[in-house]
Amino acid sequence: MKLVAALLLFAVATCTAHAGDVHISVRDPRAFGYFIGDTIERTIEIDTGNSMELVPAYIPRPGALAYWLDLVAVEHTPGSKTAHQQIRLVYQIFYAALEPKRLELPGFKLSFRPLPPADTAELVTRDIAPFSFLASPLREIVTPKSEDGTLPLRPDAQPSILPTSRARTMVLAWLALAAAAAAGLLWYYAVWPFSLWTDRPFSRAARRIRTINGIGDDALKHRLLVLHRAIDETAGQRVLAGDLSTFLDRHPAFTPVAPLLMKFFDSSRQAFFRNDTAAARHTLSDHDFTTLTQLLEMRERSGA
């Protein structure tokens, strides 16, 4: 009898020591403010020490727990230590509450067995308590009505004034930049109002020549005359064919255009003094005349 008592005392002491090695903590979420379709997550931290291990068969399995509740996910992962484990349970509720109602996630049991495993070893069971929470309705049950029986409407929200100072500053800055660019282009091409005081005879002549329509003799003479006046204005005096070398000496920027200028004066002499516009066009074609006008305008813009 004494031997049996000693063995029983030893077994109880062993089980007590094993049971004392299991530490469980449950992290629950907030207990209110859940609507139909929401999920609730519970996390269970387990520390079994070096003498106990969790029996995997007792870990809950995903599935329907009630008509309004599903266990949709179960994750069992070991921690940084072999004796530390974590169980993550994700529930989803489908209860359409008509008023605030307290519901409960069911509890369950976890079982542990001593190490090393033995067929005769007794399991240590720990209870995981249920979790109670408050389900909320999606709408009010009783809607207040006004005296005439109609539903009251909330007042319109007052529109807030959006800050526009930064956008206004950016717009003004871009407008100023665009105005400066436009002014620069107008000055570069000697367009009004810069044409009033900008000394760009060839730029003004190029614009006038582009406005002369027709391919007849009068149009040809008109274009030649306009370019003559631009050369005279640039030189500050009348420039004839014999004065071309003097003109180029005083304005060396136009020296690269000298061959076309010589053709221009020859063409002008044939058109005005011989009245032979056909020969004038043969000497200086319309394409060459346009090229000459553009080159003179470009050299003038470059500061000639």
Image (cartoon, grey):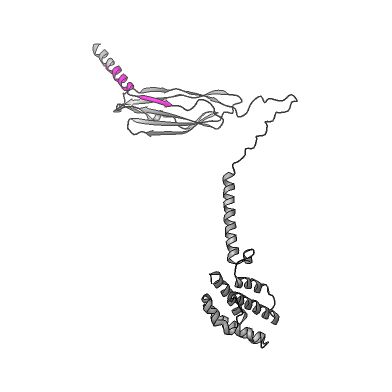
Horizontal side of residue 86 vs 33, given as left or right: left
* Picture residue at 63% right of the left edge, 73% below the top: 205
Chief secondary structure of the magenta span? helix
Q: Quadrant of the N terminus?
A: top left
* Picture residue at 63% right of the left edge, 77% below the top: 227
Q: Position of residue 140 (x, y in %)?
A: 63, 26
The total of numbered circles placed on residues is: 0
Report if residue 281 is visible in the image: no
Q: Is residue 18 magenta?
A: yes
Q: Position of residue 148 (x, y in %)?
A: 75, 25
Vertical comparison of 181 with 70: above or below: below
Horizontal side of residue 5 vs 228, given as left or right: left
Q: Residue furthest right?
A: 148
Magenta region: 10-27
Q: Quadrant of residue 118?
A: top left
Q: Is residue 303 magenta?
A: no
Q: Position of residue 270 (x, y in %)?
A: 64, 86
Q: Position of residue 300 (x, y in %)?
A: 56, 71
* Picture residue at 59% right of the left edge, 51% below the top: 172
Q: Residue furthest top?
A: 1
Q: Residue furthest front?
A: 237
Q: Residue furthest bottom?
A: 274
Vertical comparison of 129 with 240: above or below: above
Q: Nearer the viewer, residue 286 or 112?
A: 286
Report if residue 179 is visible in the image: yes
Q: Nearer the viewer, residue 296 or 31?
A: 296
Vertical comparison of 159 with 145: above or below: below
Q: Quadrant of residue 295?
A: bottom right
* Picture residue at 36% right of the left edge, 24% below the top: 23
Q: Nearer the viewer, residue 214 or 159?
A: 214
